[in-house]
Structures are given as C-alpha cells and as structure tokens.
Image (cartoon, rainbow, N blue to C red):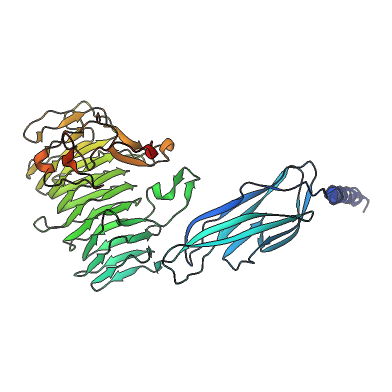
Amino acid sequence: MKRLAAPILLLVAFLFNLLACDGLDENYSTNPNHRLAFSTDTLSFDTIFTTIGSATKAFMVYNPNAQPLLISEIILASGEETGFRINVDGRKGDHFQDVRIPAEDSLYVFVEVTVNPNAENQPLLVEDSVIFTTNNVKQSVRLEAYGQNVNLYSQGLTVTEDTRFTAERPYLIYDSLVIAPNVTLTIDPGVTFYMHDAAKVIAYGTIAAKGTREQPILFRGDRLDFILQEVLPYDRTPSQWGGIFFRPESYHNILDHVIVRNGQTGLTFEKSSPEESKLKLSNSQITNMGDNLFAAFNCNIEVTNTELTNAGGGVAVLIGGKYQFVHCTLANFMTLKKRTTACLTLANNANSENYPLQATFENCIIDGSFDAGKENYKGELNLSIDEAAPFDYQFNHCVIKSVGENNEQFKEVLFTKESPTYRLQGGEKNKYAYDFRPDSTNTLGVGKADIFITQQYPIDRYGVNRLTNDGPDIGAYEYVPKENKEE
C-alpha cells in the first residue's frame, strides 16, 4: 500500500491543479464593452438544391480581450426551422449555454443547411442567424442561402419514349441519364443539367439540344461552391462528372448553343458508320475536361462556330471517319491536369485496324501550351498516318502552333511558335477563367480568315458579324474591343 501512496498523491495533486486552472470562472470579464468579434458578419451559401444538404461552412468567434469571456447563450434564431444546422466547437444543437472562450482565443461555429422544396421555380432566399449573448449584450452572425428546386433523378433516368425536357427547373442527375435506342430526347433552350460525381449522359438514341445565344443549354457538375475560396470554384475544375457518350447506334444528334464543361471526358463517340450523320455541333463550347475532350471513332461529324478547349488528354482525337470543322477554336492550356497529348490528333488506324479518314479544318485555330517543336507538323498537331488506308485531310486558312510549310494539305496556314493572345488565359490571376476571344487587332489570325468560307458562317458564337470588319478572323470568335467594365 505504501508503494501506491506516492502515485495516488501525485494524481490527486494533478487533478487539483487541473481544477484550479479551470478556475477561470472567477476571472470572466463582466464589462459589457468586452465583446466578441467574428470572422464574418454574414455566412453565405451558394445555391443549394432542395432536399440536398450543403457542404459545411464555418465562421470563427474571437475574444480579442485580455480577459476570458463567458458566452451565456448561443442560439440558432429559427431553432432549425429554416433548415440551417450549427455545431459549436464540436457540439451539435440549436441552443448552447455557458460557452467559455479564453482571453485572446477563438472557437469555430460550423454551419450546414438543407432547403425544403417549395412550389417556386426560381431560387428562394433562406435566412437565419446565430445569436450570441455575452454580459447581456447580444451579437449575431447572419446566415443566408438560396434554395433551388430541381427535377431530381437520384437513381438515374432512362428515357424510353420520345421526351422533351423544358427549362422551368434544372435537372439534377445522379448515376446516369440514358436515352434508349430509337428514342429522341429534345432539350429546350435554357435547360441546365447538374451532373453529380461520375454521372454520365449515355445516348443510344438521339439528342436534339437546340439552345439559343440568350438561352444556351448547359451540362456541368453539381458542386456550386469553391475548392479554393474566392479563387477556384468547382465549376472551373475538371473531372466533376462523367461526360456524354454516344453509342454506335446513336445518329443524327444536334447540339446547337450548348455548353458542356468540367467532366472527366467531354463528348465521346463510339465506332459508327461514317456514311450517316453522327452529330452536327454548332455555336457551342466544350471545355475543361480531365481526359479527352472530343473523341470520335469512324464517325461523320460537322462542327461550326464552336470552342473546344482545355483537357488533360486531347482536345480533339479523330480516328477514321469524316469530319468538317469551320470557324472553330481548338486550344489546350490545361493547368489543373497534366497534359498528355497534342491538341489535335488525326489518325486512320486503331487496334491494328485501318479506317479511312477525311477531315477538313477551315478558318480554325489549333493551339496550346506545348512547344511547336522542330519537326514539321508536330507541336499541337499529331498526324498518325497508316499508308494502308486513305488519309485525306486539309487545313485552310488556319492558325496552327507547329512548324510547317504550306502545300496541298496546308493552304494559307499561319504556322506559329508563339500562341495567339487571348483575353483571359487562366491561372490564379484570372481565377482560372479563360476567354479565347482575340485580345487585340494584332492577335495572330485577326483579319486572316478565308472570306469565302466566312460568308457561309457570317455570325460568330457571340453573335458578332464577321463581315463588318476589314477582314474576318480565324477561330470561333471575331475580335471586338473590350468594354471599360471588362478592363
């Protein structure tokens, strides 16, 4: 027993000292001028889909005073009726009492919200507040979120008959949206698809997506918050969802004034017959994919007035088939994924089999961050030619980041070692935003397009008339001066 006496005495002494340290209670400031400070006066959430919980946000509560404070009460004003929930330094609830905060110290308040559905189609503002009472002085932090009703398909959706999607509410897709064989999905102007992690659009039938300049059709990920606060939103981060896949039996698809962004892949076209139209893509933007952005195997595809930009893989990978690109901007300046291949790949072979290729590019830009190289027709251009099959291609009045000479395949092409200058070229300075419109009248390709081709496509993707300047510009966009608010 004597051997245990010393350790027990030490333990008792330790507990006594610990309790004595907790005697801060006697030193709490009662001065009503000793107030709390907060990291923000309003905690705002981006738009929240109804019934789908938000990501967790937080604000900090500071005691800037030289004495400890006892917060007698912390309450969520609504008592969780608005859908907000709080956690104060690890404790959940809507009402907390006697919360201690030492001198010149702080604590976290974590906040989540789930918005209840309502009958409205437009976003609805939901508000609440967290109220702190210290020495009979009340202070508060405002909470706000916009709730958006959606057409929710939490188990995916298979469209088995001709169907029209209208624009009253967005569509939130988990798993996959599948268009069955011999079925047409018509998508009205202004429809937005929010695609959950790894969700895909899979077309066995036909997609007829006809937006307008004022009301484009949008496919994007469903994360509406920031991955780097106030710098990089999830909406500018690649690989947020699966991509759009066109199966071999899918033909006669139309995408006009459509924006597809931030998938693992963009548009993927499986092996088909080049004698039948696979897709007509116009006035659109396909951008920011983790892997290949536009990949087609033995298809018949026409692309006009369209931007295809930024991918971890190739921007356009075309193997066999028939392709026509007119007034398009193909550029790859991906920085959030490691690039693996040239901007544009043309090939007439795959898996030891040969597929005749016929491709024309007129008034197009083929550009990117790769070096132009020293060999002809390399750099951002990859020509994979098998002599055993036809390989028929032509570039007419294009800007290509490569070394080369004009000949029968390259007519009036501007080969360049330096990329043209664009309005926004990504990076943290531009918050990872890109704007591939020409930056000035001196930008390579401005005024250099083939006017006879342009006369067939006189309006650019933003509605600018190409025929009113001294000469039309190469690419999807006509140069226009910046407005003051853009500077």
Q: Nearer the viewer, residue 200 or 94?
A: 94
- In this view, the residue in front, 470 or 419, is 470
Please state if 92 lies on the left or on the right of 220 as rendered.
right
* Residue 75 position within the rendered picture, expressed as x and y whole percent measured from the top left: 69, 61
Estimate the x, y position of residue 160 in percent, counting from the top left.
26, 73
Q: Which corner quadrant of the image does residue 78 belong to?
A: bottom right
The residue at the far top in this view is 374
Is residue 42 found left or right of 296 in the rendered image? right
Residue at image x 13%, y 47%?
Answer: 324
The answer to whether one can see residue 353 in this image is no
Q: Is residue 251 left or right of residue 98?
A: left
**In the image, what residue occupies the spot 20% across and 42% down?**
345
- Residue 250 visible in the current orientation: yes
Taking 163 as reference, is 32 above or below it?
above
x and y percent of residue 153 in the render?
38, 68
The percent coordinates of residue 170 (x first, y second) are 37, 63
Q: Quadrant of the N terminus?
A: bottom right
In the image, 195 versus 423, the foreground residue is 423
Front-most of 110 and 346? 110
Taking the spot 34% from the left edge, 60% from the top edge, the residue there is 192
Q: Kindly give the residue lying farthest to the right in the view shown.
A: 2
